[in-house]
Image: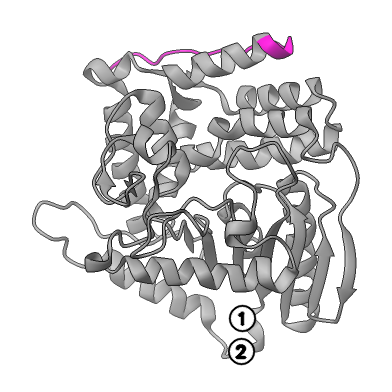
C-alpha cells in the first residue's frame, strides 16, 4: 500500500476517533475488543444449538462488518440470526450442495443454512473455478442473510482475483413512482487487487442506504437525512419509524428527480443475477423483513475473475487509477479524495489503534439483554481516555 494511502487512512482514523472521544458523543459509546465480539457472537449462536463451525462462520462475517465500519451489518444483526434459528426458519445444521456445474459455473442449493455458511461455500467454489478456468460464476438459492457482500469479494482479492458478490433481500425498497415496497436493498460488491496489498473494494446497497442505518437511527433516537426513505404515502420523511412502519426505503439516488430510477434499475439487475437465475424467491415474493413465517429462500451470486487471463499488467493499471484519484486536488472544504475501500481501511486502522470497536451504548444494552435471555456471558466493554 502506498504512503499516500497510509497517510489518508491515518487522517481518516484520527477524524473517526475524534468523533467517538469528544464531548457528549464519548459517553454514548463503549469499546469492545474484536476477539470479545467474535466470542460473544459464537456464544449466542451456540446457545441456540448452532454447530461450532457455523457459529464461527457467522461471527467472522459480523465482526468483519463492524471492523470495516459497516455497523448496519455487524452486531446489529445478531438478534435476527438468533431468532431465525430459534423459530426454525433457518436450518440448524447441514451443508450446501452443488446441483449443477460446469468448469466455470455452478448452481448451488443452500439448504436454508445460515447465509455466511452458504456464502463461504459458494465463494470458495467460484475462486477455485477462476483459478482453474479463468472465471468462476456461482449462483445459489435457498440461502439467508449473508452479512456484508464485501466479505466475499475481499477473499477473491486475497487470491489475486477480481471478486463480485450480489444478493437479493426482503422487499424494502419502493420503486420509483411507487408507494409500496417491492425490491430489496440488493447489495453489490466488486473488489479488485492493486499493488502491495492495496485494493478497490466497492460494497454498497442499491438503496440509498442499507436498512441497518435506518434501524441504527431509530435505535439512537435521531432523525435520518433526507433521501433515505418514504412514509406509507410514498412521501419523503426523516423519521426512521415512518420508514420502518408502513413506509419504505428509497433506491440509490433517492427520488426520480435525483436519478433514483438508476438505483431501482440496479436492484432489478441484482434480481436477474440472484433470485431469477437461481430460481429462488424474487422481489415481492420474498418473505417480509424479520418475518418468521417461512424460509427466506434468498438468491445469491458470486463471481471470481482471474485478471491474468486478460491483458497483462492489471494490478499496475488498477493502482495507477486509484493513485490518480487520490492525488486529485480536493474540493473546497474537503481534505482528501478517496476510492472505494479507503474509508473501511481507515476504520480498521482506528480499531487496531484503539484496541477494539466502538459501539453505541443502546446497542451494547441490547446485546446485554440478549445475553441475559440466552444465559451467556455478556461482552466485556471499556472506555478510552479522551485526548
Q: Furthest residue to the left?
A: 332
Label 2 crowding class (10 Å Cα cut-off): few <14, some 14-19, many 20+? few
Look at the image and say whether residue 386 sits in the magenta stretch: yes
Q: Which residues are magenta?
A: 373-387
State the residue at coordinates (66%, 78%). Answer: 306
213 or 319: nearer the eye?
213
Q: Is residue 356 above or below residue 282?
A: above
The residue carrying mark 2 is: 310
In the figure, residue 98 lies in which quadrant? Answer: bottom right
* Res 160 seen here: no
State the residue at coordinates (64%, 26%). Answer: 35
Q: Is residue 135 above or below residue 65?
A: below
Label 1 crowding class (10 Å Cα cut-off): few <14, some 14-19, many 20+? some
66 or 3: nearer the eye?
66
State the residue at coordinates (74%, 43%). Answer: 294
State the residue at coordinates (75%, 27%). Answer: 45
For the C terminus, the image quarter is: top left
The percent position of residue 234, horizontal first and vertical second, equals 32, 52
The percent position of residue 356, horizontal first and vertical second, equals 50, 26
Is residue 16 rendered to the left or right of residue 379?
left
The percent position of residue 107, horizontal first and vertical second, equals 81, 70
* Res 144 seen here: yes
* In contact (CB < 8 Å): disc 2 and disc 1: yes
* Labelled disc at residue 307: 1
From mark 2 to mark 1, how far is it between C-alphas?
6 Å
What kind of element bears circle 1?
Answer: helix
Amino acid at each position: 500500500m502506498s504512503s499516500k494511502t497510509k497517510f489518508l487512512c491515518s487522517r481518516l482514523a484520527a477524524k473517526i476517533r475524534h468523533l467517538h472521544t469528544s464531548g457528549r458523543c464519548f459517553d454514548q459509546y463503549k469499546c469492545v475488543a474484536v476477539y470479545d465480539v467474535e466470542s460473544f457472537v459464537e456464544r449466542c449462536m451456540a446457545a441456540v444449538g448452532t454447530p461450532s463451525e457455523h457459529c464461527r462462520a457467522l461471527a467472522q462475517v459480523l465482526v468483519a462488518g463492524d471492523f470495516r465500519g459497516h455497523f448496519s451489518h455487524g452486531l446489529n444483526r445478531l438478534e435476527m440470526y438468533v431468532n431465525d434459528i430459534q423459530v426454525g426458519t433457518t436450518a440448524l445444521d447441514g451443508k450446501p450442495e452443488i446441483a449443477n456445474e460446469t468448469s466455470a459455473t455452478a448452481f448451488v442449493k443452500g439448504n436454508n443454512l445460515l447465509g455466511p455458511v452458504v456464502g463461504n461455500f459458494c465463494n470458495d467454489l467460484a475462486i477455485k473455478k477462476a483459478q482453474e478456468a479463468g472465471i468462476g460464476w456461482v449462483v445459489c438459492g435457498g440461502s439467508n442473510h449473508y452479512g456484508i457482500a464485501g466479505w466475499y469479494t475481499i477473499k477473491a482479492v486475497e487470491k489475486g482475483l477480481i471478486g463480485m458478490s450480489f444478493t437479493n433481500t426482503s422487499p424494502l425498497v419502493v420503486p420509483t413512482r411507487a408507494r409500496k415496497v417491492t425490491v430489496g436493498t440488493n447489495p453489490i460488491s466488486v473488489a479488485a487487487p492493486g499493488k502491495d496489498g492495496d485494493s478497490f473494494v466497492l460494497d454498497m446497497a442499491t438503496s440509498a442506504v442499507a436498512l441497518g442505518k435506518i434501524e441504527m437511527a431509530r435505535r439512537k433516537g435521531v432523525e435520518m437525512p433526507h433521501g433515505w426513505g418514504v412514509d406509507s404515502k410514498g412521501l419523503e420523511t426523516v423519521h426512521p419509524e415512518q420508514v420502518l412502519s408502513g413506509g419504505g426505503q428509497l433506491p440509490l439516488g433517492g427520488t426520480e428527480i435525483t436519478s433514483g430510477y438508476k438505483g431501482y434499475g440496479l436492484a432489478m439487475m441484482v434480481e436477474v443475477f440472484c433470485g431469477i437465475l437461481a430460481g429462488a424467491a424474487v422481489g415481492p415474493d420474498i418473505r417480509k423483513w424479520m418475518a418468521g413465517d417461512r424460509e427466506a429462500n434468498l438468491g445469491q451470486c458470486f463471481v471470481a475473475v482471474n485478471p491474468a487471463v486478460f491483458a497483462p499488467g492489471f494490478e499496475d493499471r488498477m493502482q495507477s487509477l486509484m493513485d490518480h484519484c487520490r492525488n486529485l486536488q480536493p474540493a473546497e472544504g474537503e481534505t482528501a479524495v478517496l476510492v472505494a475501500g479507503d474509508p473501511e481501511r481507515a476504520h480498521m486502522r482506528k480499531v487496531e489503534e484503539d484496541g477494539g470497536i466502538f459501539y453505541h451504548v443502546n446497542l451494547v444494552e441490547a446485546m446485554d439483554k440478549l445475553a441475559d435471555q440466552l444465559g451467556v456471558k455478556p461482552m466485556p466493554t471499556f472506555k478510552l481516555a479522551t485526548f
